[in-house]
Image (cartoon, grey):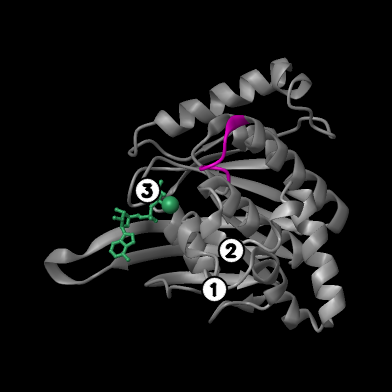
Amino acid sequence: MLDVVNLSHTYGEGPNAHQALGGIDLKVAEGEMVCVVGPSGCGKSTLLRSIAGLIRPTEGQIRIRETTVADTPGDLAVVFQDYSRSLFPWMSVGDNVALPLRRRGKDRTARRAAAAEALEEVGLAAASSKFPWELSGGMQQRVAIARALAYRPSLLLMDEPFGSVDAQTREDLEDLVLKVREHHRMTVLLITHDIDESVYVGDRVVVLTRSPARVAGELSVDLPFPRDQIATRELPAFVHLRAEVGRLVRAKKESPPVQV
Ligand SMILES: Nc1ncnc2c1ncn2[C@@H]1O[C@H](COP(=O)(O)OP(=O)(O)OP(=O)(O)O)[C@@H](O)[C@H]1O
Ligand SMILES: [Mg+2]
């Protein structure tokens, strides 16, 4: 589904140049949920923006279903880290969620119904006629998630989507993303700095090194479905995987990639 080959990106030029990505290779299969974990500032958002076609990487290739990414692919939805800039402040919450559905060729009634259903799923059915700036940060992020889910993309990119919500909501949204991906056979690439979250939702966890980011190692998560916030996290296999991811995150940049 997604194939990232030797991706490098350097911001700026000359003495101000900063290499954010140092040659990343990453494959995501159809229907897979891959979590990318890495230290703060290592280049995770740069990787996501490159895949979304929003920045042109200085080196390397990105292919989505064999098509090279030149600009933003149509069947893709992105949930950005910075929720405060991802909604249109002059549009109601319902209209924000419904807007991208125009590209799906849905009529007005169908768009409204899909938006209402997605808002219901994130627990914001009552906020539909409010404006984004009338909501808390966590609520705005849930609206952005609802908008992405309503679109039913075949590839969903999420950049630390649950960073600004409380712990309970975070767990609910993790389960929601698992459910929707199962239901609609979506492929998901989720960026997080939360090791537990990466193991809980992922089929696979890819760990990046410090800047310039490279793949430090990756692990398959063979935990049973459906996952459960309490039972899954108690499994010895979960505890083991969490420790392994933690080790990779803390590993020195110089060490060679580890395959577990
Ligand atoms: N537009 C830009 N111009 C110049 N440098 C940038 C730009 N965007 C990011 N950088 C730099 O590139 C590096 C990687 O940034 P990026 O936002 O991709 O990291 P991140 O892993 O997403 O960080 P965080 O964990 O804080 O979200 C950082 O050192 C950052 O300062
Ligand atoms: Mg980031």
Considering only vertical position in the picture, is 204 above or below 145? Answer: above
Label 2: element kind:
loop
Name the image quarter holding the N terminus: bottom right
Residue type highlighted by circle 2: Phe
Q: Label 2, label 1: how many angstroms apart (C-alpha)? A: 7 Å
First in sequence, mark 3 or 2: give its number: 3
Q: Residues within 10 Å of mark 3 (few under 14, many from 20)?
A: many
Tell me whether circle 2 and circle 1 mark residues in contact (CB < 8 Å).
yes
Considering only vertical position in the picture, is 244 above or below 155? Answer: above
Q: Which residue is mark 1?
A: 90
Residue type highlighted by circle 1: Trp
Label 1: element kind:
loop
Residue type highlighted by circle 3: Cys
Left or right placement of residue 210 versus residue 50 in this view? left
Mark 1, ligand 1, within 8 Å: the answer is no
Q: Residues within 10 Å of mark 2 (few under 14, many from 20)?
A: some
Q: Label 1, label 3: how many angstroms apart (C-alpha)? A: 34 Å
Q: Main secondary structure of the magenta part?
A: loop
Label 3: element kind:
loop
| Residue bounds of the magenta highlight | 162-167
Residue 203 visible to the viewer: no
Name the image quarter holding the C terminus: top right
Residue placed at 54% from the left, 81% from the top?
A: 71
Q: Which residue is mark 2?
A: 131
Q: Which residue is mark 3?
A: 42
